[in-house]
Image (tube, rainbow, N blue to C red):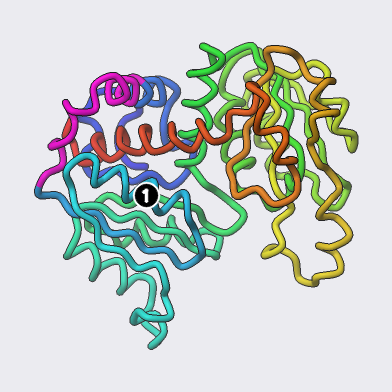
Amino acid sequence: MRGPSNANAADWNGRHFIDSLDLSPPEYEALFDVANRIKEGPSNYSSRCVGKLMATLFYEPSTRTRLSFEAAMMRLGGQVLTVSDVATSSVAKGESLADTIRTVGGYADLIVMRHPREGAARLAALYAPVPLINGGDGAREHPTQTLTDMYTIRTFKDRLDDLTVAFCGDLRYGRTVHSLIKALARRSGIRFVLISPEELRLPNATKEEVLASGSGVKIQESIRMEDGLRDCDLLYMTRIQKERFFNEEDYIKLRDTYVLTPEKMKEANKDAIIMHPLPRVTEISPEVDEDERAIYFQQARLGMLVRMALIIRLLEEE
C-alpha cells in the first residue's frame, strides 16, 4: 500500500490494500472506528458512494468475500460490476492480468480481485489506475479477512493486546492464518498456539517473520487441539483445504484431523471465542453453533461493515 502510514483520510489517496501489513495499527483502529459508526447509524452512510462503481474480479471461487464486498458497496449507495467466472471473460482468450486490470480500471473507481496465484495482487496493483484490494491470492494473503478478524476480536474481546490465540487446522496453506498472524504479531502481549498436523504446519518463513517483528510474541506448536483450548482467549479454526492438495489421498488422510465438538468445548475457557473464516466443512460440528462462544456468523456480518469502512477510506468518502 502506498502512502504514509497514519490514519488521516487525506493520506489514503492513490493507495491499494494488498498485504495485511499495508495498514499500520493506528490505521486499523481508525477503520474499526468508521465500521462502528456505520453499525450504529447505517442510514448516515447509505448514499456515501452514490455515483461510484466497484469491479469484483474473482479468478477463484468465493461466496463471503465477493458478496460481502458487493453488499458493502451497494449499502453505501454505489454500484457493482462483477466477473465471478473467468471462463466467460477475455482471460479465457489469453488476456494478460495487466491488460485486464488496465481495462477494468477504466470502467470502475475501485477493483477487488481474488486470484489463485501468489503475488498476483501485487502484480495487478502495478497496473491498476484505481485503488485495488486483494481479495485473496493463493496461499499467501487475505488482508480483508484480517480486517474482519481483527475487528471481530476487538468487538468481542474489547482489545487487541494481551491475547492467547490458538490457530487450528491448515496453517500451511491457510492465507487467512498467514495474514492474521502477521497483523496480530505487531500487538503487545501476544501468544500463539499453533495446532496442526506436521504436514500442515505454519511455514518457517512466516514464523521467522513473526519472531523477527520485535514485539516479543511467543509461539507454541502442538498437534493436540486440547493444548490450545485450555487457556486461549480465542480459537481460530480453519478447514483443511482440498483445493491446495496435489493428490486426494493426502487430503483424505488429513481432512478430519481436528473436529470441534460440544464435548471438546467443555475444555475451553468460559469467555473464549471461537472464530472461523468460513466456509466450514467438517472441522466444527453444527452443534457447536448453539454455543454462545461460537461467533463465526457474527464475524461474517462484521466483515461487511469493515469492508464498507475500507471502501469509504480508499475512495476518500469519509
Element assignment for label 1: strand
Which quadrant would residue 36 be assigned to in this image?
top left
* 83 displayed left or right of 168: left
Image coordinates of residue 112 in percent, x first then y, are 35, 54
Q: Is residue 91 magenta?
A: no
Kindly identify the residue that appears in the image at 54 percent across and 64 percent down.
116
Figure quadrant of the N terminus: top left
Magenta stretch: helix, strand or loop mostly: helix
Decide which of 124, 139 is in the foreground and name it: 139
Kindly identify the residue that appears in the image at 51 percent across and 11 percent down.
158
User: Label 1: which residue?
Assistant: 133
Total number of numbered labels? 1
Q: Is residue 47 magenta?
A: yes
Image coordinates of residue 85 in percent, x first then y, are 42, 73
> Can you see residue 216?
no
Vertical order, 214 against 62 (above or below): above
Name the residue type under label 1: Ile
The magenta region covers 33-50
Which quadrant would residue 35 be assigned to in this image?
top left
Vertical order, 200 against 277 (above or below): below
Vertical order, 19 against 318 (above or below): below
Image coordinates of residue 290 in percent, x first then y, are 66, 29
Mark 1, other Cα within 10 Å: few <14 / some 14–19 / many ≥20: many
> Can you see residue 233?
yes
